[in-house]
Amino acid sequence: MRIVDAHLHLVTSEMVEEMRKDRGLREKEIREARKRLRLPEFELFDFHTTVKKWVSEFERYHIQKGIFLPFSHNLKEMLTLIKLSDRFIGFTTVDPTREGASELLEKGLKAGLKGIKLYPVNRFFHVNDPGADRVYELAEKYKVPVMIHFGLNIGPGSNLLYGNPLDLHPVALKYPQVNFIIAHI
């Protein structure tokens, strides 16, 4: 039997620090959110240690391929990951409301990333906002899926008002050639 894990997160100490700074979160806020949400403590590792641990898990559970979804818009680690093994498939992410988002997205897709992951509940945008159209146009151009994190979110600083899957309906009608994946409903 062939096993493909379609929802993995590459979480490294470097990525978490970048995300924390990007969102303006302090360590204390993260610790309080983890406690409030009753999340178990886990150790973060640097990029190379994290990759070694993923390889070990792939071997242990006989996983042929895995799709890694980023939290950060920094492409460096995801592009490095996909070059290490053809078993690793990487997606990219952007905040479509940020200046330069479409250029960053296109850079990742040109470099070999195979899909787009959007986090409206963390980035505070609605998926049907016209500012996100360029994301869907690029998905159509590069023939890659768009995975959208809807529904519950355990991260600090998220807002579920942006996680309504009904917002996707007009977008799916406007972009019928794009494959949309809804995660976490």
Image (tube, rainbow, N blue to C red):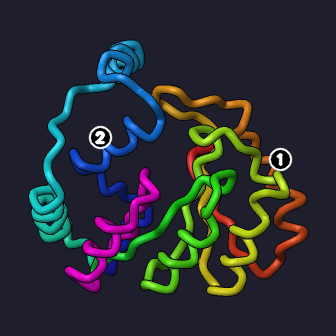
What is the distance, in whole Å, between disc 1 and disc 2 at their CAs? 33 Å
Q: What span is colored magenta in the figure?
A: 66-86
Which residue sits at x=39%, y=67%? 75
Front one among 168 and 129: 129
The secondary structure type at the circle numbered 2 is helix
Q: Is residue 172 above or below residue 25?
A: below
Quadrant the N terminus occupies: bottom left
Front one among 21 and 172: 21
Position of residue 164 measured from the top left corner of the image (x, y, whole percent):
75, 40
Q: Earlier in the sequence, mark 1 or mark 2?
A: 2
Give the amino acid at mark 2.
Answer: Glu
Left or right, 154 with respect to 41, comes to: right
- Mark seen at residue 17: 2
Give the amino acid at mark 1.
Answer: Leu
Q: Is residue 73 within the magenta segment? A: yes
Position of residue 131 measured from the top left corner of the image (x, y, whole percent):
78, 57
The secondary structure type at the circle numbered 1 is helix
Position of residue 136 measured from the top left corner of the image (x, y, whole percent):
73, 70
Which residue sits at x=75%, y=59%? 132
Which residue is farthest front? 99
Image quarter of residue 9: bottom left
Left or right, 18 with respect to 184, comes to: left
Which residue sits at x=30%, y=23%? 27
